[in-house]
Image (cartoon, rainbow, N blue to C red):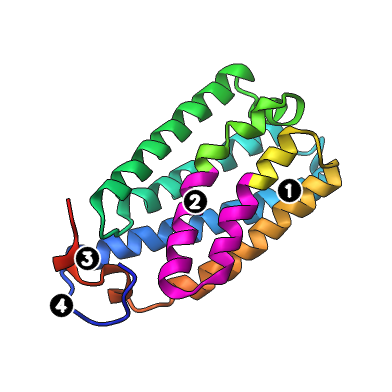
Amino acid sequence: MGDEQYFQPLTQWDRISVMLYRTGIVLSAIFILAAAWFLSNAPIYEGRISLALLTNVLLLLLYASVGLSVFFIHLYIGKFHRGLKILFYIAVISLVILFISGRGDVLAVLVSRSYGPLLLLPLAGCLGFITAKEAFCFRLVEGYMLALIMPIYLVVLAGHGLSAKGSSYGLILIAALLVVFTFRKVFMPLHFDIGDKSAYTP
């Protein structure tokens, strides 16, 4: 993890796991970008499509993509990976609460209830951990920015500190940073993500 030096030959599983991890990052960027697009253009699409259904679908896809990265990330310290998985399980429980609270309409909970955006904090924590890890390992400054901005954005949103336009701009900023992060990350040689396998601890 996080070393540009080539230590050992990569196995087939090494290559597959790195590709799955990076696929999760790419898909996360795509889904957040799509959410930002539809949020900023909601008046255009309202009446043509169900924004509530679209929100549900995009959120489920985002959870799946972040989960892909969470389970296939390469970390030297095993307890960090276990902790990240636990945080993702909490994120999934929070998602279930969102669906139950809104009776299937997550968008209504996110917009009308203060606790709605806060239930997305565990997911933001997972994605923020991933971007911060890459920032630490490969000097991707936007990774640190994402790790800070995403939870702050959700907390401000929960406190009704943003207008509809402001929340749209905030999500666009997050999406833009994530796209930059993704392009800088996914084209790195595969062995960068593996590092020295002898240094891994259970």
User: What is the tally of numbered marks visible in this picture?
Assistant: 4
Marks 1 and 3, Cα distance to the nearest angstrom?
36 Å
Q: Residues within 10 Å of mark 2 (few under 14, many from 20)?
A: many
**Circle 4 sits in a helix, a strand or a loop, which is it?**
loop
> Is mark 1 in CB contact (under 8 Å) with mark 3?
no
Mark sitting earlier along the chain (3/2): 3
Where is mark 2, residue-wise?
127
**Circle 3 sits in a helix, a strand or a loop, which is it?**
helix
Q: Residue at x 39, y 33 (%)?
A: 89
Where is mark 1, residue-wise?
38
Which span of residues is magenta-colored? Answer: 124-151
The amino acid type, in three-letter code, at marker 2 is Leu
Residue 187: quarter of image: bottom left
Please state which of the two labelled residues, at mark 1 or mark 3, is closer to the viewer: 3
Please state which of the two labelled residues, at mark 1 or mark 2, is closer to the viewer: 2
> Is mark 4 in CB contact (under 8 Å) with mark 1?
no
Q: Residues within 10 Å of mark 3 (few under 14, many from 20)?
A: some
Marks 2 and 4, Cα distance to the nearest angstrom?
29 Å
> Is mark 2 in CB contact (under 8 Å) with mark 4?
no
The amino acid type, in three-letter code, at marker 3 is Asp
Which is nearer the eye, 61 or 184?
184
> Is mark 3 in CB contact (under 8 Å) with mark 2?
no
Where is mark 4, residue-wise?
9
Position of residue 5 in the picture relative to residue 88 (left or right): left
> Is mark 1 in CB contact (under 8 Å) with mark 2?
no
Q: Residue at x 18, y 56 (%)?
A: 201
Residue 41 appears in the rendering: no
The amino acid type, in three-letter code, at marker 1 is Phe
Queried whether the magenta region covers residue 141, the answer comes back as yes
Where is mark 3, residue-wise?
14
Chief secondary structure of the magenta span? helix
The amino acid type, in three-letter code, at marker 4 is Pro
